[in-house]
């Protein structure tokens, strides 16, 4: 049985212990006592060194704690252990912050925590709640940060499961003696994790994204140095946008909205103009074209059109009498074809067949169609196939 030193002292960074068993050729060590926290309760394991060798995993095996090393250890049984403290402290802040938050969601809105996750970049807690409004989120954040500022003691006690059951925020399945973590006057939880000794050490607490997961709500949160780093990154990103807009950070949101509205309006104007230009272009080509023996005018699209222009041009050509048209955007090997309504021909079927012969793909309606070809050399092959086909005039 490993004596878990972190149970009674979260702040123990180094310790001396005796190896009681070596497994996996010295890559897996069992000690009589250890300050290494094993992965459990959603909190990741500690890293650090044992006898100078890197500890890459720490596994909770109920009675014992297994220390998995990066390389075999062949030294004496008496070993010195050192915890990677910045990593541990980071998780201590996130973990205690989670107790504080879960207690706050419960106290203010009766929303129980159903699961928690502590990641390397951000942590989440899932609440049993149908929804969480932005106003509720702000209230919880303010309340939790006020409790941080009050620097309330966080106390660890060992109590009998039955005696403590009624005071627990969340029922425990365990029996016998429980390790109880109490944030004075706020939250009582059964927990085997590592915690700060007073709420002030959690530092700033920031709630971020809220996501609906089935019948629950998942909330991202960051505490302590992470919250400061996150806020710094947010500010840097926001001020970068503000600088490009020649505005202050507070002006960014309304400015971006105004620009988005303007872009939408301009896109609509642009669409109308593109259609108008395409109509004129098609009409000029049509007037200059000499009808074939079958009475059909064959229009070839000019190079340099964008795909929007090509599509609009094809639609305009389809609206002209006795006309067949085909054009391309060579850079993207996109081809459009059009056939007037008064001709006995189907643009979609025609283009599809011509495309398939060269391994291209596409199709469309009887009047207009579009597709792409795999090679530059196929563009003219397909254009010719469409334009050189025989078209009979419509009976009407
Ligand atoms: Zn805990």
Image (cartoon, helix red, strand yellow):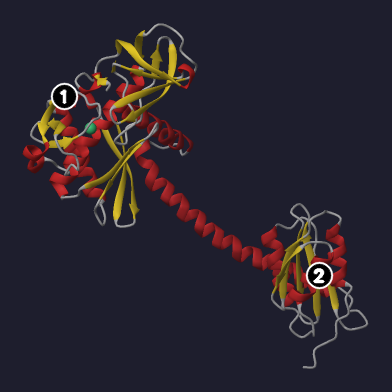
User: Any atom of ligand 1 within 8 Å of the CB at mark 1?
Assistant: no
At mark 1, the secondary structure is: loop
The quarter of the image holding the C terminus is bottom right
325 shown above or below 232: below
Out of 24 and 303, give the one closest to the viewer: 24
At mark 2, the secondary structure is: helix
Residue at 86 percent across and 73 percent down: it is 289
Q: Quadrant of residue 32?
A: top left
- The numbered disc on residue 285 is 2
Residue at 66 percent across and 61 percent down: it is 308
Q: Earlier in the sequence, mark 2 or mark 1?
A: 1
- The numbered disc on residue 228 is none
Please state the horizontal and vertical placement of residue 369, each as a whole percent of the image: 72, 71
Taking the image in four quarters, ligand 1 sits in the one at: top left
Residue at 72 percent across and 79 percent down: it is 366
The quarter of the image holding the N terminus is top left
Q: Quadrant of residue 339?
A: bottom right
Relative placement, left or right, of 199 versus 268 is left
- The numbered disc on residue 198 is 1
Q: Quadrant of residue 231?
A: top left
């Amino acid at each position: 049985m490993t004596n878990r030193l972190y149970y009674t002292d979260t702040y123990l960074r180094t310790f001396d212990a005796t190896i009681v068993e070596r497994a996996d050729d010295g890559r897996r060590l069992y000690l009589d006592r250890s300050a290494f926290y094993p992965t459990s309760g959603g909190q990741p394991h500690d890293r650090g060194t044992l006898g100078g060798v890197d500890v890459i995993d720490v596994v909770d095996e109920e009675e014992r704690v297994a220390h998995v090393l990066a390389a075999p250890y062949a030294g004496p049984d008496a070993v010195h252990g050192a915890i990677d403290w910045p990593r541990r402290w980071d998780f201590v802040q996130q973990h205690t912050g989670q107790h504080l938050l879960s207690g706050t969601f419960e106290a203010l809105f009766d929303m129980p925590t159903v699961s928690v996750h502590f990641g390397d970049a951000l942590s989440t807690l899932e609440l049993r709640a149908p929804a969480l409004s932005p106003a509720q989120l702000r209230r919880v954040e303010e309340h939790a940060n006020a409790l941080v500022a009050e620097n309330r003691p966080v106390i660890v006690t060992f109590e009998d499961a039955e005696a403590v059951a009624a005071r627990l925020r969340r029922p425990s399945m365990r029996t016998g003696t429980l390790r109880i973590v109490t944030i004075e006057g706020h939250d009582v939880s059964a927990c085997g994790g590592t915690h700060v000794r007073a709420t002030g050490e959690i530092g700033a607490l920031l709630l971020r994204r809220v996501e609906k997961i089935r019948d629950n709500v998942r909330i991202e949160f960051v505490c302590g140095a992470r919250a400061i780093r996150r806020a710094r990154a947010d500010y840097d990103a926001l001020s970068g946008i503000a600088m490009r807009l020649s505005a202050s950070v507070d002006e960014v949101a309304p400015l971006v909205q105004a620009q988005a509205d303007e872009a939408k309006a301009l896109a609509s104007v642009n669409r109308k103009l593109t259609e108008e230009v395409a109509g004129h272009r098609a009409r000029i080509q049509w007037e200059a074209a000499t009808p074939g023996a079958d009475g059909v005018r064959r229009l070839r699209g000019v190079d340099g059109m964008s795909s929007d222009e090509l599509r609009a041009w094809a639609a305009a050509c389809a609206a002209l009498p006795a006309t067949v048209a085909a054009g391309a955007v060579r850079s993207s090997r996109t081809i459009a074809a059009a056939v007037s309504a008064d001709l006995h021909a189907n643009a979609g079927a025609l283009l599809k067949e011509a495309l398939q012969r060269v391994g291209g793909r596409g199709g469309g309606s009887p009047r207009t169609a579009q597709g792409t070809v795999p090679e530059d050399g196929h563009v003219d092959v397909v254009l010719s196939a469409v334009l050189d086909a025989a078209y009979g005039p419509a009976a009407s």
